[in-house]
Each structure stands twice: as C-alpha cells, then as structure tokens.
Amino acid sequence: MRYIRPHSLEEAAGLLAGSTGTAAILAGGSDLLVRMKGGFIEPDLIVDIKAIDGLGEIRETAEGFSIGAAVPCALMGESAALKREWPGVVEAARLIGSKQVQGRCTIVGNLCNASPAADSVPALVAAGARALIIGPGGRRTIPVEAVPTAPGKTSLAKGEIIEAILLDRRAPRSGDAYLRFIPRTEMDIAVVSAGVNLTLDEQGAVESARVAVGAAAPTVLLVEEAAEVLIGSKLDDATLERLAKVCSGACRPIDDKRGTVEFRRKVAGVLARRAATTAYARAGGK
Ligand SMILES: Cc1cc2nc3c(=O)[nH]c(=O)nc-3n(C[C@H](O)[C@H](O)[C@H](O)COP(=O)(O)OP(=O)(O)OC[C@H]3O[C@@H](n4cnc5c(N)ncnc54)[C@H](O)[C@@H]3O)c2cc1C
C-alpha cells in the first residue's frame, strides 16, 4: 500500500487518475480507516489531502462560503459567520459522532462516503450547496445531491476530488434547520432526518423552499413537492400537516433493527414539520 501526502490538488488528482488498483482519498479518515480496519477495503494507494494548501480553510467571499474539503466539522462550529448564515448546515455537521470525531471528520467525507444516513447531507441539499470538483478534465461544479448515487457510491469519475463545498450568501428573510432521530442523544446514525431551508417574502409568506429527507431512501431525497406545499404559506397547521404527509409519502425506507418502514415514514414527516418551523422562525417568520 502506498500512502502519499501531496501538496497540491493537481498532484493529488494526477496521482488518483494514474493509479492502478484501488485508490482512496483520505480526509479525516473517520469512515475510510474504519472500513480498512474492518477489512472491507484495502486500498493500493491512499492520497491524504490534508496537507494541500487552502483545503483546511473556510473562505468567505462576496458570493458566499467555500468550505475546503479538509475542514474538520469542529472548525465549522467555530466560524461565527457560517453559523450566523447557515445554522442548519452547522448544526448538522456538529451532530456527527462526538467532539473527537468532529475534530477529524469533514462534510466532504460525509458526502462521499455516500451513506443515506449522513447527517450533513440533507442540510447541504436543503441549503442548495454545490460541490466544486477538480479532476483530469479541469474543474466543475455540481449540486451536492448529484454526488451520491447509491449507498457507498458516488458520481465522481476516476481522478476527481471534491475541492470544496460552496454555499451562497444567505438571502434576506431566510433560515434553515436540520433535525435527526436517533434512539440516544449522540454517537448514533440517523434513523431518519430532515433539512429545510426557506426564504420569506416581505409579508412573511414562504417565497422559496427546499426540503430534504435523509435515511429514507438509497440517497438523500430532495422533496420538491414538499417545497411546493410550503410556498405561499405562513406555516399554518394545515400546511404543516400537508408537509408532513408529503414527506412521509416520499420516503422509500428500509426495514431494519433501527427502524421499521412505518416508523421511518411517520418520523420523516414529524421532523420535516419541526425543521420547517425552526427554519421559519430563523427567517423571522411569525
Ligand atoms: C465513532 C463514529 C461516529 C460517527 N457518527 C456519525 C454520525 O453521527 N453521523 C454521520 O453522518 N456520520 C457519522 N460517522 C461517520 C463519519 O464521521 C462521517 O461520514 C465523516 O464525515 C467522513 O468524513 P472524513 O473526513 O472522516 O472522511 P474519510 O473517512 O477520510 O473519507 C470518507 C470517504 O470519502 C472519500 N473522500 C474524502 N474526501 C474526499 C474528497 N475531497 N473528494 C472525494 N472523495 C473524498 C474517501 O475516499 C472515503 O471514501 C461516525 C463515524 C465514527 C467513527
């Protein structure tokens, strides 16, 4: 096994593109090392991206935020600007594992591990986040929901690396929120989860919305019909009831020891409703 710690993205992408056998990118290692120790994967090449200049930084620009692929989730919680503009995204990142895990893990690793239960992903999908990718063909940007294609699988081509996650500047009168259900208070994987991001018009009615549900299908679901339910409303009870129904109906969950299909469907609706209420309040809705 070769372990290489390149200092530029171009070098990292070149190593991955030219590799034969199994290659893996190492960010925080909180999934990769667990899978290696469990004997599920034995890479011939490991490309550690943590020494690449700029990848460990959160950059604030006129357009928004660029969260480098090596930024540990703990650092996201220390960015006052990011917390102020994207509280739902930060709260999702800060739910992952424990303080120790958050000191290592990244949202890009969370996305690329492609678990339908990944905590940061519904919040990022609701936020309309994009993944900036570098690879042999140059750079491209895609919506985060286009990265995971199935459990454990992504749409990234050989040699491609996610350089950063891009979030827009928060629009006026808007807010986001993320909630998950786990049977205990921490160190558990979401049984089901929901992220909501919405913007209000000057009268306080929802003008635009994005609703995502996690751990309820092979990949995180962007529930467009749920957004349509919210638009034009001030989140009255009837709207919230319809939102819950639509989100429950969109789920295609599995039945396992952590939750039945019926339970996951029901709780997806409950969480979407609660997340929408919090996002609405954060947007200044009354
Ligand atoms: C004790 C424990 C508790 C956990 N609890 C939770 C939890 O509550 N919620 C939750 O969602 N997850 C949880 N996890 C899973 C884990 O922490 C996350 O999925 C983590 O965010 C992965 O990030 P990482 O930087 O550690 O990724 P790594 O392990 O380094 O990489 C993960 C995968 O992504 C790929 N990858 C990494 N970076 C890139 C990149 N820049 N471009 C392309 N591919 C890349 C890697 O090759 C690998 O396949 C837990 C893990 C542990 C060990």
Image: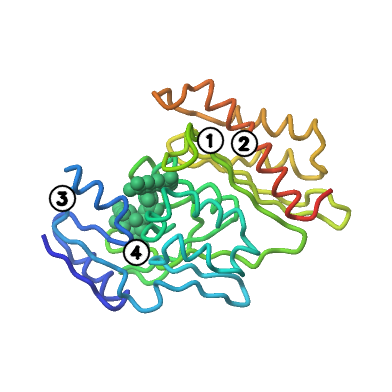
Element on which disc 3 rests: loop
Classify residue 118 by image quadrant: top left
Q: Which residue is mark 3?
A: 42
Of labels 2 and 4, the one closer to you: 2
Determine whether label 3 and label 1 are within 8 Å by CB: no
Determine whether label 1 and label 2 are within 8 Å by CB: yes
Q: Which residue is mark 4?
A: 161
Q: Decide: is 106 above or below 136.
A: above
Please state which amino acid type lies under the numbered disc 2: Leu
Gap in Å between the C-alphas at discs 1 and 4? Answer: 31 Å
Gap in Å between the C-alphas at discs 2 and 4? Answer: 33 Å
Earlier-in-chain disc, 3 versus 4: 3
Gap in Å between the C-alphas at discs 3 and 2? Answer: 38 Å
Q: Residue at x 60, y 27 (%)?
A: 249
Please state which amino acid type lies under the numbered disc 1: Phe
Determine whether label 1 and label 4 are within 8 Å by CB: no
Of labels 3 and 1, the one closer to you: 1
Q: Residue 23 location in percent, x, y?
A: 20, 58
Q: Nearer the viewer, residue 64 or 263?
A: 263
Determine whether label 3 and label 2 are within 8 Å by CB: no
Disc 4 crowd, CA 10 A, few/some/many (<14, 14-19, 20+):
many
Disc 1 crowd, CA 10 A, few/some/many (<14, 14-19, 20+):
some
Q: Which mark is residue 271?
A: 2
* Ligand 1 lies under 8 Å from the Cβ of mark 4: yes
Q: Which residue is mark 1?
A: 181
Q: Nearer the viewer, residue 19 or 104?
A: 104
Element on which disc 1 rests: strand
Q: Residue 206 location in percent, x, y?
A: 78, 49
